[in-house]
Image (cartoon, helix red, strand yellow):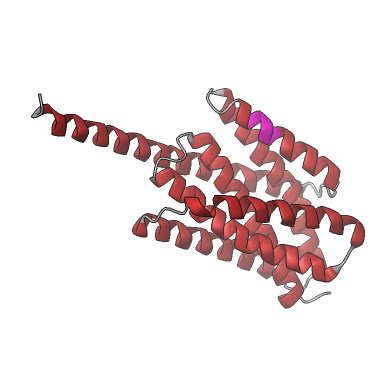
Amino acid sequence: MNQNLPSARTQAAYGQALATNSVIRNTYILLSLTLIFSAASAGFAMLSHAGPVSPLLVLVGYFGLLFLTQRLRNSAWGILSIFALTGFMGYTLGPILNFYIANFSNGSELVLYAAGSTGAIFLGLSAYAFSTRKDFSYMGGFIMAGILIAFIASIANLFLHIPGLALAVSSMFVLLMCGYILYQTSAMIHGGETNYIMAAVGLYVAIFNLFMSLLQLMGVFAGRRR
C-alpha cells in the first residue's frame, strides 16, 4: 500500500502540471486573439474618424462587460463576452490615437514607442516570472488598493483638470500594471488562477492600461505639439 503512495503523488503532480500548462497555453492564445481583435477595432475607429467616447460610457461599458465576462467565465459565452469587452476597449482607443497623431508632429512615433515599450515590458516581466517562478501572490492586496486609489484619482481629475495629478496617476498605473502582470503570471504558474478567460482578461486590462499610461507620459515629456 505504501509502495503506491509515491506513484499516486507523482500522478497527482503530473496532472496538476498538465492543468497548469493548459491554463497558461489557453490564456496566451486567447490574449493574443483579443489583442489582435482590439487592434482591429481601434483601426476601424481611426479609419472611420469616430468621435471620442464619453468617459461615462467608457466606464459603464467597461465594467458592464467585465462583470458579464466574469459571470460567463465558465461557459463558451465567456469567449464572446471577452471579445465584446476587448473590442469595445479597442474602439474607445481609436479616437485617442487619432488625437495624438493629429495634435503632435511626432504623434505616430509616440504611439509606436508606447506600443513597443508596452510589448517589451510585458514580455520582460512575463519572462522574469516564468524563469524565476517566484510567488508574487503577496502583492495582490497592495496592487488592488493602489488600483482603487489611482482609479478614484483619475475620476476626480476628470473634473479637477490638474496636469500634475494626471501625470501622477499615469505613473502610478505604469507601476501598478507592471506589478499586476507579475502577480497574474505568478497566479497561473502556481495554480492560483485556473480560469484562462479571467487570466486573459486580467492581462489584457493590464496591457491596455500600461499602453495608455505610457502614451500619456510620452505625450507630456516627448510630444511636439503642432
Q: Foreground residue, 72 or 191?
A: 191
Does residue 29 belong to the magenta stretch? no
Give residue 38's position: percent from left, percent from top.
63, 44
Is residue 215 visible in this depiction of the protein?
Answer: no
Q: In which quarter of the image is residue 108?
A: bottom right
Residue at the spot 91% in from the left edge and 56% down from the top edge: 159
Give residue 145's position: percent from left, percent from top.
66, 52
Numbered-mark total: 0
Most distant residue in the front direction:
2
Q: Foreground residue, 54 or 107?
A: 54
Q: In this view, does 116 lie to the left or right of 16?
A: right
Residue at the spot 64% in from the left edge and 41% down from the top edge: 86
Q: Foreground residue, 205 or 138?
A: 138
Give residue 32's position: percent from left, percent from top.
51, 45
Residue at the spot 77% in from the left edge and 64% down from the top edge: 100
Q: Quadrant of residue 87?
A: top right
Quadrant of the frame with the C terminus: bottom right
Q: In this view, does 209 lie above or below 214?
A: above
Q: Is residue 168 left or right of residue 156?
A: left
Q: Quadrant of residue 88?
A: top right
Overall secondary structure of the magenta section? helix
Quadrant of the frame with the N terminus: top left
Q: Is residue 139 left or right of residue 132?
A: right
| Span shown in magenta | 65-69
Q: In this view, does 65 lie to the left or right of 117?
A: right
Is residue 212 visible in this depiction of the protein?
Answer: yes
Give residue 35's position: percent from left, percent from top.
58, 46
